[in-house]
Amino acid sequence: MIVSGILFSIGIVGLVIAVVHPVMPGMTVVAGAWVAGALVLLVNAALRRPLQSGHVVVDGSNVMHWRDESPRVDTLREVVDHLKGQGLSPDVVFDANAGYLLEGRYLHSQDFSRILGLSQEHIKVVPRGRQADPVILDLALRTGARVVSNDRFRDWAEDHPELAQPGHVIRGRYDDGKLVLDMHDTGLPLAGRNVDQGAKAGIQ
């Protein structure tokens, strides 16, 4: 967006000069086209920029592996509860096989709603044969939300340039049993908790 703003400013200056001092024939047209192009880039950048709202979209199939790289329901619960404790509203999206990994059977959105203590409208289980990644990224873009996941989403980076913005993807891990969320520069309180001991967890 900064580059687009600079180009727009240059175009405006050129347009003013072309009008006030018409030295070169056609300079007004060129400057006008420059301004129009820069304006399009500015508008596109503004529309694609996440709003950093109080919503987050949780990559459930990724987050459930954060502790010891094993799928765990309690890991999901802790992350969701922690996000809610920070005043955030989480929507959780799962691949179709998430239930089999957690409980050996298919789990519907109402099952995850009961497990996580979230209303069903905040749970999405992607149909079989579809990938959850584009659903997660599109939902986040549409609602101005950040994404909670350790996935790099490399296959979707071209369609979602907002992934490169610091703080758009919140990553997490466990250090000595304590949940650590990398919130970057979002201004959220540096607080957390340990599920086993109730201890404070660090957030970076």
Image (cartoon, rainbow, N blue to C red):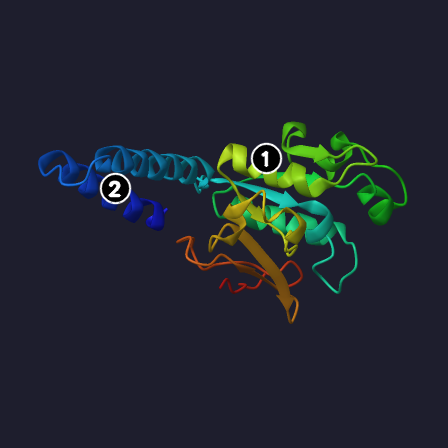
Between 8 and 44, the one lying in front of the other is 8
| Residue type indicated by callout 1 | Leu
Left or right: where does residue 102 sit relative to residue 199? right
Cα distance between the residues tagged 1 and 2? 35 Å
Q: Residue 114: image x %, image y %? A: 73, 35
Q: Residue 149: image x %, image y %? A: 63, 52
Q: Is residue 32 above or below residue 4?
A: above
Residue at x 56%, y 38% (from the top left corner): 140
Query: Mark 2 sits on what residue?
Result: 11
Examine the rendering and report whether any part of residue 92 can be seen: no
Find the residue positioned furthest to the front. Answer: 25
State how many labels appear.
2
Q: Residue 128: image x %, image y %? A: 83, 35
Residue at x 75%, y 40% (from the top left corner): 131
Nearest to the eye among marks 1 and 2: give it.
2
| Residue type indicated by callout 2 | Gly
Left or right: where does residue 150 sit relative to residue 130? left
Q: Is residue 202 above or below residue 156?
A: below
Left or right: where does residue 151 sit relative to residue 192? right
As helix, strand or loop, the secondary structure at mark 1 comes to helix
Query: Mark 1 sits on what residue?
Result: 139
Find the residue positioned furthest to the right. Answer: 104
Left or right: where does residue 195 sit relative to residue 49? right
Examine the rendering and report whether any part of residue 44 can be seen: yes
Q: Is residue 190 above or below residue 145?
A: below
Residue at x 63%, y 46% (from the top left corner): 156
* Occupied quadrant, residue 103: top right
Q: Are marks 1 and 2 in contact (CB under 8 Å)?
A: no
Using a 10 Å C-alpha cutoff, classify the residue at mark 2 as few (fewer than 14 neighbours), some (14 to 19) or many (20 or more). Answer: many
Between 61 and 75, the one lying in front of the other is 61
Mark 2 or mark 1, which is nearer the start of the sequence? 2
